[in-house]
Amino acid sequence: MIFKRTQRVRRTVTITKQIRDGILTYCKMNHPNEGILILRGKYKKGQVLVDGLVIPPFSHTGPTFAGFPHSFLPLDASYVGTVHSHPSGVAKPSVTDLHNFFGFVSIIVQSPYDDNDVFAYDRDGNLLEITISLD
Ligand SMILES: [Zn+2]
């Protein structure tokens, strides 16, 4: 964990290496379709800590859209966001992605799903800093 003191609270995302690797594997498995997972973790003072992954119920995926009906999601305070893949190779959030924003962070993984292909965005589509923790 890295804590930084800044004047303004800036949202940052910390994911463990194990979770990052799990996300990359899941995205590769779903290629050429999009894969989507729910991020489980904690949100505190602008810091999102992801320490678990949940396969969403009733998810439906295709080459250009991955989603799930939010109304089926159990109300769980430990759900901090979602991660999905962009098989196209461009990790920019689409209008649909922003409309379907859920939680505090949306992580998008672009093909070919290497360590540096993971990007985090806030509700407005602004890029957030990701820290990979080793534990
Ligand atoms: Zn997308």
Image (cartoon, grey):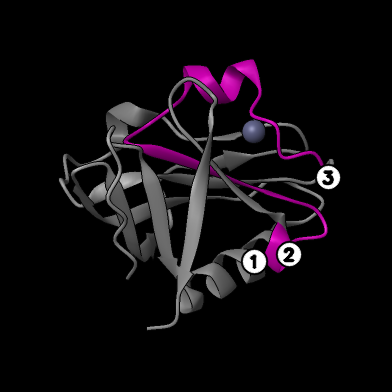
Give how far across and how far down residue 100 sits, in percent: 47, 24
Say whether disc 2 or disc 3 marks the residue closer to the N-terminus: 2
Give how far across and how far down residue 54 sits, in percent: 38, 59
Query: In the depicted view, which residue is nearer to us: 110 or 132?
Result: 132
Q: Which residue is mark 3?
A: 89
Q: Amino acid at mark 1?
A: Leu
> Is mark 1 in CB contact (under 8 Å) with mark 3?
no
Instruction: Determine crowd level at label 2: few under 14, some 14-19, many 20+ residues with C-alpha closer than 10 A.
Output: some
Q: Which residue is mark 2?
A: 28
The CA distance from mark 1 to mark 2 is 6 Å
Q: Amino acid at mark 2?
A: Lys
Query: In the depicted view, which residue is nearer to us: 50 or 53?
Result: 50
- Decide if residue 3 is on the left or right side of residue 15: left
Q: Which mark is residue 24?
A: 1
What is the span of residues highlighted in magenta in the rendered image? 90-116
Q: Is mark 1 within 8 Å of ligand 1?
A: no
Say whether disc 1 or disc 3 marks the residue closer to the N-terminus: 1
> Is mark 1 in CB contact (under 8 Å) with mark 2?
yes
- Decide if residue 58 is on the left or right side of residue 10: right
